[in-house]
Image (spheres, helix red, strand yellow):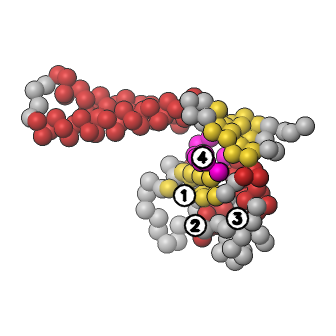
């Protein structure tokens, strides 16, 4: 019998994204509906409004998506379903994004106390699955993916190894290229 866990994105984070998407779309698209705007400005507002609308749709997809983690693999359940078996995992990348510039002496990576986030991208035979750090149980997902990557002897790039190291995994620059200690 395999043990499974179900993970969802944090409602508080998604609420903020919904507010940003709605406000951005309203500010950009509202003038097009209410005012007479010059053609060039109308195009600019329409493009930015479309970007905010796309961000809102992406937020909705994340809101409706659940990630199922099991001994057999990982599965995204929702509007864009995907699945990757661990024995078919072909790539793993862990990226770190920040909203502010870091100083050289600032090596802290406290994901919960900042607006910084990580994105885990797992590649399979035909599809990939992306999971952001705002999902509940992100560390457990990374742990299982890392173990599967090591079992398959996947080469991890330097950025992924550094980000794994920042999360407490022994995959840093001193580790061999395959990430095994």
Mark 1 or 4: in front is 4
**Residues at marks 3 and 4, CA–CA distance in whole angstroms:** 17 Å
Q: Which residues make up the magenta segment?
A: 124-138
Tell me if residue 6 comes above or below residue 36 in the rendering: below
Location of residue 10 with respect to 106 vertically, above or below: above
Disc nearest the viewer among 2 and 4: 4
**Residue at far top of view:** 34
Name the one closer to the observer, 150 or 15. Answer: 150
x and y, in percent, of residue 128 in the image: 59, 48
* Residue 62 horizontal/vertical position (percent): 55, 35
Q: Which numbered circle lies on residue 153?
A: none
Name the residue: 43% across, 57% down: 100
Label 4's element? loop
Q: Nearer the viewer, residue 5 or 75?
A: 75
Point 31% across, 35% down: residue = 50
Kindly report which numbered mark, 3 or 4, lies closer to the viewer in this rendering: 4
Q: Are marks 1 and 2 in contact (CB under 8 Å)?
A: yes
Q: Earlier in the sequence, mark 2 or mark 4?
A: 4
Reading the image, the residue beneath label 3 is: 154
Residue to which mark 2 is pinned? 159
- Residue 171 makes an appearance in the image: no
Instruction: Please report the residue visible at 81 percent of the width from the left and 45 percent of the height from the top.
Output: 71
**Residue, disc 1:** 96
Q: Earlier in the sequence, mark 1 or mark 3?
A: 1
Question: Rounded to the nearest whole Å, what is the CA distance between mark 1 and mark 2?
Answer: 9 Å
Residue 69 in the image: x percent, y percent?
A: 74, 41
Spatial CA distance of label 1 from label 4 is 22 Å
Frontmost of labels 3 and 2 is 3
């Amino acid at each position: 019998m395999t043990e499974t866990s179900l993970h969802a994105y944090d409602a508080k984070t998604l609420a903020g994204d919904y507010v940003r998407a709605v406000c951005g779309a309203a500010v950009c698209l509202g003038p097009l509906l209410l005012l007479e705007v010059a053609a060039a400005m109308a195009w600019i507002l329409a493009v930015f409004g479309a970007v905010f609308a796309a961000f809102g749709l992406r937020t909705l997809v994340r809101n409706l998506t659940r990630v199922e983690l099991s001994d057999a693999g990982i599965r995204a359940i929702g509007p864009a379903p995907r699945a990757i078996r661990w024995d078919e995992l072909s790539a793993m990348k862990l990226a770190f994004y920040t909203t502010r510039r870091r100083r050289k002496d600032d090596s802290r990576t406290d994901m919960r106390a900042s607006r910084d986030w990580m994105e885990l991208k797992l590649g399979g035979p035909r599809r990939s699955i992306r999971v952001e750090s705002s999902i509940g149980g992100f560390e457990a997902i990374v742990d299982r993916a890392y173990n599967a990557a090591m079992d398959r002897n996947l080469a991890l790039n330097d950025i992924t190894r550094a980000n794994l190291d920042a999360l407490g995994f022994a995959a840093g620059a001193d580790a061999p290229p395959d990430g095994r200690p």
